[in-house]
Amino acid sequence: MNGRVGFIDETGKLVIPFQYSKLIEDFENGLAKVLKGNDLGMINMKGKEVVKFGEYDKISGWNGDLAPVFKDGLWGFINESGREVIKAQYQSVPFARIFTEVAPIICVKKRNKWGYIDRKGKVVVPFAYEDALWFTEGMGAVKLNDKWGFVNQQGMIIIPFKYEDVDHFSEGRAAVRLNERWGYIDKKGNRITEFEYDLPVVKFSGGYAMVNQDGKIGFIDKNGKEIIKPKYDFGGPFVNGYAVVGDKGQAGVINTDGKTIVPFYYDKMSEFFGNGLIKVYKNGKYGLVSVDNKQVTDIKYDRIGTPLSNMNNGLIEVRVKGVRGFIDPNGNEYFE
C-alpha cells in the first residue's frame, strides 16, 4: 500500500502495518527480512524488530538455526533470536542455503586461510587451507598446495591432497578431477570410475549420477557401472526412477533401464512435479504429461508455475492469454 509492505494473516486481517519499504525474504525460522528505508533488518511474526535495522549490510540464508551476517567487511552468524552468536570476524563464509544438510561444522576464512568452526564458533579445523567446501556427509573438501583432499569433522586428513578439483559428497560418492578428467571416489578415496568424464559433473541422487563424456550424456550407478552409456545430447538427474533426456533437439523421458517412457517429441521438458507430472514445452506453449506418457492437459498455456502448498490442494498456477487460473493434478481447470 502506497509503496509500503505489510503482512496479513490467513483471514486477510492486517497483522503487521504497512511500514516497510521492501520485503527481501519472507518468513523463515519465524523471521522475515525487510528494508525500512535503506536499512536491512529482521522482524518476527508479531512485527517486533528482532535484528536491528541498519545493524548489518547483508543477511544470508539460514542453515538450521544460524544465518551468516555481514558488517564492517566481515562475516559472523546470528541465531533465530537475532543474537550475534558468532562474532563478525571472517573474510568469507559459504552461502548455506544451497545445502540441504545442516552442517555440524562450518568453513570460514580468516587471515586469508580457511578452516572450520563448530556452530558455537569454536575452531575445530585450523586455519591452514587455501580453500574449503561446506561439509556434507561428514566430509569436507580442503585445498593445500593447489591440490584438493578431504578431512573429517576432527580435521584428520581422510583423502590425500592430489585432485585438481572436487565436488561435495552425496550418497557416499564425490566427483573429483585428475589429469583434466573427472571420475568418482568413495569416502575412503577408492576410485569407483575411471577418470574419463567431462563437466558438468552431477551429484548422485537416488543411486544414480548423470555423466558427460565427449559431449554426450549417460548415467552410472553407485558402483561406477554405466547403466546407460553416454549417447544423449542433454539430460537431468533421475527422479523416482525417471530422467529427462534429449536426442536430436527433442526431449523425452527414460527409466533406469534406458527404456523410452515418454517419446522424444517435446522442445523442452522442465521439472518433475511430486505427483508424477512433467511440465512440457512445444511450439511456444506449455502443458503437462505424466511419467507414464499420459497427456494430462493440452499444450496451450503461456505459463505453468509450480504446485502450490497442500493448503491449495496441489493446484498449479497457469496463464493463457494473460488470464490467470489453476489446474489440478488431473488437468481440471479453474479460472478466475
Image (cartoon, rainbow, N blue to C red):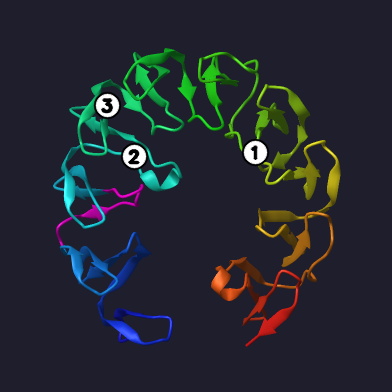
Residue beneath the point at 42% across and 17% down:
149
Q: Nearer the viewer, residue 75 or 239?
A: 239
Q: Answer whether residue 239 is magenta in the image.
A: no
Disc 2 crowd rating (10 Å Cα; few below 14, some 14-19, many 20+) is some
Residue beneath the point at 27% across and 26% down:
115
In the image, is 102 to the left or to the right of 315?
A: left
- Report helix, strand or loop for mark 2: loop
Quarter of the view holding residue 93:
top left
* Image location of residue 101, percent across then percent down: 44, 41
Amino acid on which disc 1 is placed: Gly
* Image location of residue 11, percent across then percent down: 43, 86
Amino acid on which disc 3 is placed: Gly
- Spatial distance from mark 2 to mark 3, Cα to Cα? 12 Å
Quarter of the view holding residue 290:
bottom right
In the image, is 215 to the left or to the right of 66?
A: right
Q: Earlier in the sequence, mark 2 or mark 3?
A: 2
- In the rendered picture of this protein, how many numbered marks are placed on residues? 3
In the rendered image, the vertical position of residue 9 relative to residue 63, given as above or below: below
Q: Which residue is mark 3?
A: 115
In the image, is 101 to the left or to the right of 82?
A: right
State the quadrant of the C terminus. Answer: bottom right
- Spatial distance from mark 3 to mark 1, Cα to Cα? 31 Å
Q: Earlier in the sequence, mark 1 or mark 2?
A: 2
Q: Which residue is mark 2?
A: 94
Q: Earlier in the sequence, mark 3 or mark 1?
A: 3
Q: Which residue is mark 1?
A: 206
Specify start and end residues of the magenta stretch as a single range.
54-67
